[in-house]
Image: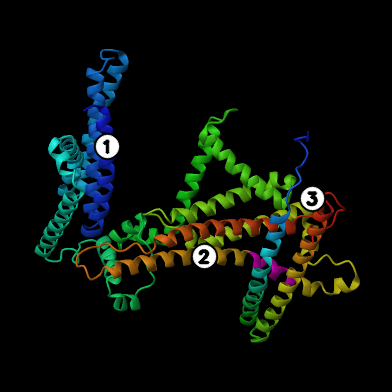
Amino acid sequence: MGLEFLARVRRTTLWVGALAAIVGMTYSGFAAGGGLAAGAVWSLVNLFLVERLVVALTGSDRGTPAAARGAALALAGMLGLFAAGAFLLMALPAEPLLVGFGFPFGVMLLKACSTLLLESAAWRRFTASRWQVALAVALLIAATWAIAERSVAASGGAVAAGPSGAAHGDAAHADAAHGDAGEHGASSKPTMFPNFLGVVIEANHGKPWADALHHVEPVVFSLFVALLLSGIAIAANRRRALRPGRFQAGVELVVQGLFDFVASVLGEKHARRYLPFLGSLFLYILAMNWIGFVPGFHAATANINITAGLALCTFLFVQFTGMRELGFGGWVDHMAGSPRSAIEWGLVPIMLPIHIIGELAKPLSLACRLFGNIFGEDMLLVGFASLGIMMLGFIPNVPVGIPLQLPFLFFCLLTSTLQALVFTTLSTVYLLLMLPHDDHGHEGEAHPAH
Amino acid sequence: MPDPREEKPRDSSLRSAGLLLAIPTLLIVSPLVGFFLGSVVDRWLKCSPWGVLLGLVLGFVAAGRETYLIYRRYLAEEERSRRR
């Protein structure tokens, strides 16, 4: 078994560790789940450093300065790892840490056993008949179910008496889905799918920093998306080549598509100037909408404060563009309805508030439309997921449900994209309405902006 | 062969669609903004319900005016693209 086997063990352990951490956090609290995850990560890093050390000492380039450097780094890493382990033992409970530590070894053992089993003659004889296999699988499921039920009954409802806020919060959510909806639903506000930040906040409920974090939860997710997009942009610009690789080509495709879109509304001349703002707006909203579909994350645009912020930025940008293109006097003239005759001047006290109302209506409509659609999508998915869990509520102690929200995920993916497009299209149109008529890439006589 | 420095003729259907997309939302939201501003004026000048009524009227007028201007712009774009 070579290094490739160890790479497969690492990948499998990551998945097993992540699943175990989620189950541990759900049923035993944040500390237990965190301990499982930390133990698994610690063990994987340890395994990686041992592998590096062994390769450096026994590989084909042993004795060379590079191998000696590799060995020294691996040893230094191990020292740091042991220090981190001591800290983890102080901060987290020992049992989950030890269980997490054992994950890679458990995976190795299972993979080795399965390799021996699958290559054996007895297995080939057993799997020759599909009915034999089906019967064996059915018996295995029944035996696992009986053992699980007996062990949960023996632990005396440990799930309901979870020590931390995270278990309480999620058990309350599961209870609501298992048919106590009338009792819980009447007193609680609509629930969302749990996210990483929400789990941390629930686990530390009552602490000042957790309460403060709860108020800025959407801002944290929007900041994460902004950093992610910035990272992609920086990475794409770092090693630009005349013959692009796949990553650069992908980014160029996106930028070209956005340029074509903006140019078809504003004309090429203005598209070059306003593409950075409008293109970033579209990608930012799209990424925030889509990240809500990733388990553990939350769509920040499902919060009115985020969409209002985006709409306000757009409104201020459009007004600033109007002032820059028309001059301050021209902008005031535009807001007053461009009076030219005595009657029009007389109507200025009426036209000015009318135009102000018309301008204020634009960001309000942008904010409310985006918020309403994304929040509604979240509610739709939560509702159908809860329904799916309730449908299997007759099976005791089984925290799974029929994924009724699955067909709606594809619908919501489409509407999320559409809402990002609508927001950007309307922002572009509002910009178009502010710009002078002669400057949108077409020939013809000049018209002042209306 | 077309000069790459020259602007490409662009399909204006997206511009027209975008202009028309703005109309329904402005029709609904402008009276709401007028209502809100009117209620602020009512609270400030203590002249309820005249502030709200005036705000609603101005909101409806703003909605109609914006719709008219956008539709006029849409017709101008359609005429320009037909001439091309």
Taking the view exactly as shown, the residue that stands out farthest to the right is A342
Alpha-carbon span between mark 2 and mark 1:
40 Å
Q: Disc 2 designates what residue?
A: A373
Magenta-drawn segment: A352-362
In this view, A409 is above or below A236: below
The answer to which image quadrant residue A379 occupies is bottom left
**Which badge, 2 or 1, comes first in the chain's sequence?**
1
Mark 2, Cα crowd under 10 Å, few <14 / some 14-19 / many 20+, is some
Alpha-carbon span between mark 1 and mark 3:
59 Å
Name the foreground residue: A135 vs A174: A135
Mark 3, Cα crowd under 10 Å, few <14 / some 14-19 / many 20+, is many
Quick check: marks 1 and 3 in contact, CB under 8 Å?
no
In this view, A99 is above or below A80: below
A164 vs A372, left or right, is left
Marks 3 and 2 belong to one chain? yes
Marked residue chain, label 1:
A
A74 vs A311, left or right, is left
In this view, A217 is above or below B1: below
